[in-house]
Image (spheres, rainbow, N blue to C red):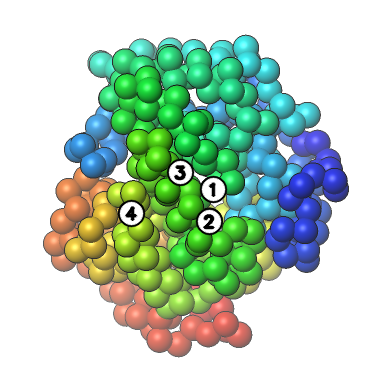
Amino acid sequence: MSKPSPDVYEQGKGMDAHNAVMREVRSQNDATYDPREPTRVWLDEDNTPDGVYQSLTIILNTGGCRWARAGGCTMCGYVAESVEGGTVAHEDLMAQIQHCLDHEAENADDPSGLIKIYTSGSFLDEREVPAETRQAIADTFADRDRIVVESLPDFVEAERVREFVDAGLETDVAVGLETATDRVRHDCVNKYFDFADFEDACVAAQDAGAGIKAYLLMKPPFLTESETVADMKSSVRRCAAVDGCHTVSMNPCNVQRYTMVEELYHDGGYRPPWLWSVAEVLEATAEEDVIVVSDPVGHGSDRGPHNCGECDDRVQRAIKDFDLRQDPSVFEQVSCECEATYDAVLEREHSYSMPLAR
C-alpha cells in the first residue's frame, strides 16, 4: 500500500492521535492488487421501499478512500485492499464492472433488479471513480430497476446523483453515518463529519430525486455492549426522522486487518458485538417508519459478531428473516442458555472492565 501523504486535505479533520495510530497500523500492509479485478462481488436478496429484490453487490477496487489515506476510521480495513498509487484508470474500472457482469451471468438465472456499488471509500468521489466512469456505469445498468451507490456526505452532490436518476434508475445513496451521536462518531470511529452533514446529504440526494440509505456501525471501539445497544436504538430513530432516509442498515463491527480495532482485539481490549444485541435493536426499532436491516459479516467467528457458538447460526437466520419480512416475532423463535451471560454483560460491563466476556 502506498504511504499516506501528509498533505492531503483530510489532515487535521479527525483526532490527530487516532490518525497517527491508523497510519502506523496501515503501513504494515505491503499487499498489492490487480486494478482490473473487483475487490468482491456477490448475489443476494435485499429489502427496498419497492419490495425484495435479487441484488448484485459490487465492491470496486479503487485507489482507496482519501480519508483512510490520512488515517481514517478505527474499524475499516478496506483501504488495505485498494490499488497501489491512489488512482485506477477508467478502462480498468470498467473491466471490473464487466467481471461482475460475467459473475452474475454465470450464477443467476436472471439479471438482478438491484445493483449495489461500493468502493473502499466514496463512489461519488471523482478521485476514486472519475465522472466518465460514473456516467458509463449509469449507462451500463440503465436497464435495471434500482441502484445503490455509497459515499461520504462530502461528495453527495445533486448533479452527480442525478446521472443515475436520469438513466431511469430508482437511486439510493448509502452514507456511512455509523452513528447519529457526533461524539461517538468523532472519538470512537474517528470520522470527521457531523450528523448535520448527513442531513445536508439527504437534502442533496432528494434534490436529485434519490433516497438515502444510512449505514450504522454497531459497537465501535471504546463502547460497552449496553452503550452500543442504546446508541444504535437512538441512531435508528434519529435517522428515521430525517426526510429522504428510508432505510437503515446496521452493520455489527467485525475485526478487519490493519485497523485499530484489530490492535485492540489482539490486546484483549475489544470484542465484536453479541448477535443478541443485533436482535435487540432490530426488535426495538421495528415500528419505526424506516426499513431497518442488518448483515452480520463473519457471524459466529471470534473476529465477527457472535454469541456462544451454539446459537449463532440460528440467530443469524432470524436476523436475515427479519431483514426480508420486517417481522420482529422471528426473534421469539430463538433462545439459548447464553442469554443469561449476555444479560450479565449488559448489566455489569463498564468501560474499565471490557470486554467482560469473549
Element type at mark 4:
loop
Q: Nearer the viewer, residue 5 or 212?
A: 212
User: Considering only order in the chain, which callout, 2 or 4, is on the residue closer to the N terminus?
Assistant: 2
Q: Is residue 185 above or below residue 114?
A: below
Which is more foreground, mark 4 or mark 1?
4
Do the numbered discs 4 and 3 sit on residues whose CB atoms are within 8 Å? no
Let me know if residue 161 appears in the view. Answer: yes
Q: Nearer the viewer, residue 35 or 292?
A: 292
Q: CA distance from mark 4 to mark 1?
A: 15 Å
Q: What residue is shown with label 4?
A: 243
Q: CA distance from mark 4 to mark 2?
A: 14 Å
Q: Residues within 10 Å of mark 4 (few under 14, many from 20)?
A: few
Q: What residue is shown with label 1?
A: 153
Q: CA distance from mark 2 to mark 3?
A: 11 Å
Q: Residues within 10 Å of mark 1 (few under 14, many from 20)?
A: many
Do the numbered discs 1 and 2 sit on residues whose CB atoms are within 8 Å? yes
Do the numbered discs 4 and 2 sit on residues whose CB atoms are within 8 Å? no
Name the residue rendered at 52%, 38% in the picture: 157
Let me know if residue 358 appears in the view. Answer: no
Do the numbered discs 3 and 1 sit on residues whose CB atoms are within 8 Å? no
**Residue 204, numbered label:** 3
Residue 49: x and y, percent?
A: 23, 42
Q: Nearer the viewer, residue 42 or 249?
A: 249
Q: CA distance from mark 1 to mark 2?
A: 6 Å
User: Considering only order in the chain, which callout, 2 or 1, is on the residue closer to the N terminus?
Assistant: 1
Kindly indicate the quadrant of the structure image that contains residue 262. Answer: bottom right
Name the residue rendered at 85%, 46% in the picture: 7
